[in-house]
Image (cartoon, rainbow, N blue to C red):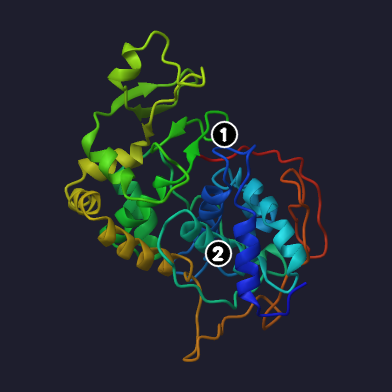
Amino acid sequence: MSSPGDYEAVRKDIAAQLKKPGYDDGSAGPVFVRLAWHSAGTYDLETDTGGSNGAGMRYEAEGGDPANAGLAHGRAFLEPVKERHPWITYADLWTLAGVVAIKEMGGPEIPWQSGRTDLVDDSKVPPRGRLPDAALGAQHLRDVFYRMGFTDQEIVALAGGHNLGRCHADRSGFQGPWVNNPTRFSNQFFRLLLNLEWKLVTLPHGVQQYIYEDPDMADEADGDDEDGEKEEPLMMLPTDIALITDPDFLPWVKRYAEDKDLFFDHFTKAFAKLIELGIRRDEQGHIINTDNKLGGYVSAPKKSNMPETGLETESASTAVSTGCPYKARL
């Protein structure tokens, strides 16, 4: 067990959790990034509710949101870290995990500050419906991200997170990776989005997405790769395509496709802003907003190491098994 405040030890243990040979593309990194983003992306600027303080996904009201399902795996992967460092709050652990994962996968160093507290009950969990719906378009993206206080440029920069991870047909309904190496952070998402010809298709279960039909794959006898497995086509979501059809988003897509350093710089600033949403700090950087009835640094008890169990209902001291009744997004 580390000493309270030893965040360097926490960082090392998070990095040690990234390699997952039996999970997706062999890395928990992408799901850690999504966990950090979704834990903060509930923020509403007008009402000053939601955001990265509280770790509300511990409760069914937020964790059971279809937009968050599947993140149970990311939360479970971090439980060994919580066990080794019980003093850290889940709110800090989840945001730090995203920052560490981005750096470990070749991305920029994202500024991160500690001090978030964990909610003591679910009374401050934000309402569902605040996260993006990937089946919609440009106006929907603006509705969601303007609500948090982001600009068009920041929306496009944050979309670059789709350099990581993949979609799953049995979860969100969408299927496939965005890029060739979904565990390496780069600006390839923007280059592919601009330069490939994306075809709208309807999947067998009725979900529409865009895919790139590689002519080289079509020329092969059965489309198998060197291991004899069927190659999966690259895909884009309707919200991704909106970035190149919208006249105000498109210039930023072009700039990030051409300039990796610029993208890294803008992504760093936007992601650092994202994980601070809902946080108020004094001049020394100490968080001054407090949880419900308890002030200070409130760290919730460790939960289950398994993704199928551990969502809480109304009490911070009562954990109930949910049998993971929800499906993962993306």
Nearer to us in this view, 82 or 319? 82
What quarter of the picture does the N terminus occupy?
A: bottom right
| Mark 2 nearby-residue class (10 Å; few <14, some 14–19, many ≥20) | many
Horizontal arrangement in the rendering, residue 277 relative to residue 53 (left or right):
left
Task: Look at 39% across and 8% down and name the residue there.
Answer: 221
* Residue at the outermost bottom position: 283
Q: Mark 1 = which residue?
A: 171
Q: Quadrant of residue 180?
A: top left
Task: Look at 51% across and 39% down and name the residue there.
Answer: 330
- Of tags 2 and 1, the one toward the viewer is 2
**Above or below — where is 58 with respect to 96?**
above
Horizontal arrangement in the rendering, residue 8 relative to residue 303 (left or right):
left
Q: Position of residue 321 (x, y in %)?
A: 80, 47
Nearer to us in this view, 189 or 130? 189
Task: Look at 47% across and 60% down and name the residue there.
Answer: 103
Q: Position of residue 25 (x, y in %)?
A: 54, 38
Identify residue type, mark 1.
Arg
What label does residue 95 carry, if any? 2
Q: Position of residue 134 (x, y in %)?
A: 41, 40
Identify residue type, mark 2.
Thr
Q: Are marks 2 and 1 in contact (CB under 8 Å)?
A: no
**Above or below — where is 258 with respect to 224?**
below
> For the residue labelled by badge 2, is the local secondary structure a helix, a strand or a loop?
helix
